[in-house]
Amino acid sequence: MQVKHQVCTERSTEDPEHDDNQKKTSCFSNIKIFLVSECALMLAQGTVGAYLVSVLTTLERRFNLQSADVGVIASSFEIGNLALILFVSYFGAKAHRPRLIGCGGIVMALGALLSALPEFLTHQYEYEAGDGWHAEDGRDVCSNMTRTEGRDSAFLCGNKSNTNMMYLLLIGAQVLLGIGATPVQPLGVSYIDDHVKRKDSSLYIGIVFSTLVFGPACGFILGSLCTKVYVDAVFIDTSKLDIGPDDPRWIGAWWGGFLLCGALLFVSALFMFGFPQSLDEQEVDTGGESEQAMLPPSLSGEYEGNKPINGVMQNLEANSGLTCCEHLRVIPKVTKNLLSNPVFTCISLAACMEIAVVAGFATFLGKYMEQQFNLTTSSANQLLGNDGHPLCMSGYLPGRSACKEIRPISIRGHSNGHGGKPGFYCLLRFLPLPWL
């Protein structure tokens, strides 16, 4: 009995260690698993964003919208994102980042579902029967209608109404998508950066952004597939239709892609709720030169004593007594300190310039290709999806891998022999624009 009691005692003392080992071996305690989950969510986010662009011309014909109207719909995502990005980035660093990312994914899924809702709230699509399409007039529905039906159709086409509830619902859905996307990228990248070695951080972040770039290619391909299906295919017998995808009166099932993207966003977001606020102790560089140089001299001393270890600030208890208003007063000071860094400011301005060019170019490129080259919506989306996005993705990983061995520019701003090359490459990139 004494031996048996001793064995039981040894087992009871080993149980806590056994539980700790189980926690350490959990799949949600691995930064690589978090990387996969983050990439899945970023892929779904990029897909739903590009899918909206791929069906803009379809929305124009379905709800009698103008180009300015669909431009407002496309920009509503950035409006919702900009409204909360600063606050989420600041307060999110002190909260449970994986859970915030998961909540953002669920909000995006809700926004994607709301984007498809106008199709089920409005009447079925009706088109004028007969042979009213003339190829020499292009794919503009109004130009073909005015040729055959006279002034009445011209009057109707020239006075499209943009004040319907479906238009406002689409704007609200995109704003909701922008709000949900707010915590995904900044908090996900910071979470990865806090739990990997400094030399491996660029590679991990490169994988994340490569996935984000691959998302638009998936979105355009998905738009190409959905626009081949008739918009009311689930309600009517499509075999009785006398029009096909080549007819400008054809409207594809634009709502199907939003439902699929919503499901992908919801499933991807659920995995984020399994990750802890900070992972187990790992071999992470404590930082030093790069982190101090990015801060102004007045904050370098404070940062030395307040470095985050595994994503958790050491003096968090000292700031826990601050009210919300006091935290809001700190945000302008932090923003001013960031903007005072020339490296950060130049990189931010360069990103703004690039996004400003790409945003308008990509939004209306599909419509231009349809009308200028007489392409169907499906064909235009297929060309956009297979064109430049895979090439952009192929440039991220080699560039991030090179950052592990080569420092293109020092933190202090003095070049190491490579400082002038990025600017030269940018000039070469935009040199053909005057001849387009």
Image: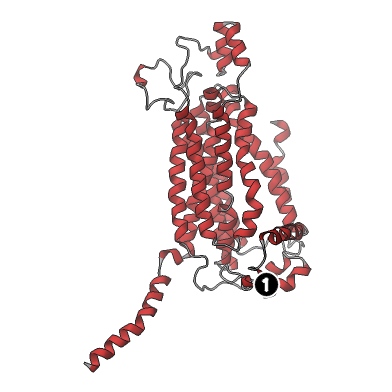
Give the amino acid at mark 1. Gly
Location of the C terminus by quadrant is top right
Does residue 63 appear to the left or right of 323 in the view shown?
Answer: left
Task: Please give the name of the residue rendered at 55% of the width and 57% of the height, measured from the top-left corner.
Answer: 188
Above or below: residue 188 compared with residue 282: above
Location of the N terminus by quadrant is bottom left
Extreme left residue here? Answer: 1
Question: 347 or 314, which is in the foreground?
Answer: 314
Task: Please give the name of the residue rendered at 37% of the width and 21% of the height, measured from the top-left corner.
Answer: 238
Q: Which residue is mark 1?
A: 288
Residue 289: image quadrant is bottom right
- Give how far across and how far down residue 10 sits, in percent: 32, 87
Question: 48 or 247, which is in the foreground?
Answer: 48
Residue 91: image quadrant is bottom right
Question: 3 or 389, which is in the foreground?
Answer: 3
Above or below: residue 82 compared with residue 162: below
Residue 229: image quadrant is top left
- Give how far across and how far down residue 204 sits, in percent: 54, 59
- Give how far across and how far down residue 327 sits, in percent: 69, 61
Task: Please give the name of the residue rendered at 31% of the width and 87% of the height, measured from the top-left corner.
Answer: 9
